Amino acid sequence: MQTAKHRAVLASAALLAGAFALSTGAAPGGQEEGDEIDRKVDDARTALEEWVENRRLISQEKRDWALGRDLLEDRIDMVQGQIDAVREDIAEAEKEIAENDAESAELEAENAKYVEAADELTATVTELEARIKELVKRLPDPILDRIGLFLKQLPDDPETTEQGLGERYMYVVGILNEIDKFNGEITRTSEVRTLPDGRAIEVTALYAGIGQAWYANAEGTIGGTGTAKPEGWTWTAANESAADIAQAIRIHEGVDQAAFVRLPLRVE
């Protein structure tokens, strides 16, 4: 299909050909004929100038089109590079997301283990606290005095306590350590005992761990035994053994030499 510019170039070429044909024809026969020839020559010149201009415009458009094509190709290359870079970023992001998902799954699994372990430890320390509260009823006064501060830290309600798990274990371990230590020792204390007749006298008590104890006055005339029972620590008079008990106390104090002493024993 011919464009308008192509048609203009063809018309200009036709006029130019006609002008040359006239210029090479017979000599002018008169004034009018000469004017006609001049007019045609002018038309041919004008047509030639238009043809030259059209050629220039065509060349300019070709150059502009070539330049535009180059710019467009550069732009396409640049955009394609950006697309490739975005694709690489997306691929990298997807890889990181996959790695993060895997790591998150591992952390969740590990956290689940910690939660399960914490639940087990919480159940254990709760049971230990309950058992300690029951054991306290069977403990003698000297060990109760040692662990009194720890006992006050045991929560009244494990379900609502604000104490941390580590803190609760610390108090439980502290109590059990003191009880174990006391249970492996012979402990001597000065106490005031109330006799069956209502009199209160000062005696020396000798504890063999947390299960058995004896007491006697300085004269060795009044004595008794102590035993742990479920309802609490109880004392029973044993005046018939007061002298032996007093001798055992003096041996423990280093006053008398070591010797075998027969002491009453009560097992509940």
Image: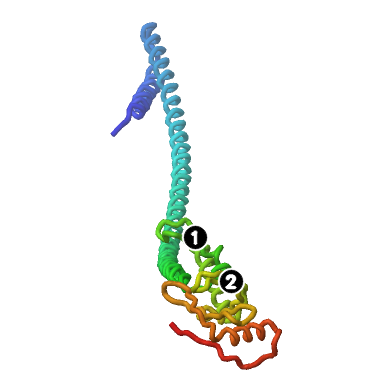
Q: Nearer the viewer, residue 186 or 3?
A: 186
Q: Is residue 259 visible?
A: yes
From this view, report whether residue 35 is shown above or below residue 138. Answer: above
The local crowd at label 1, few if under 14, some if 14 to 19, many if 20 or more residues have their Cα within 10 Å, is: few
- The image quadrant where one finds the N terminus is top left
- Label 1 is placed on what type of residue? Gly
Q: Amino acid at mark 2?
A: Ile
The residue that disc 1 covers is: 164
Which quadrant of the view contains residue 79?
Answer: top left
From what the image shows, is residue 118 above or below residue 35?
below
Q: Secondary structure at mark 2?
A: strand
Vertical side of 124 occupied by 60: above or below? above
Asked whether the residues under the numbered discs 1 and 2 touch, taking CB atoms below 8 Å apart as contact, a structural biologist would say: no
Q: Which quadrant does the C terminus fall into?
A: bottom left
Q: Residue at x 54, y 82 (%)?
A: 239
Label 1 to label 2, Cα distance in Å?
45 Å
Relative horizontal placement of residue 170, taking residue 7 as reference (left or right): right
User: In the figure, is residue 174 to the left or right of 134?
Assistant: right
Q: Residue at x 52, y 82 (%)?
A: 238
SS label for mark 1:
loop
Observer-nearest of 122 and 32: 122
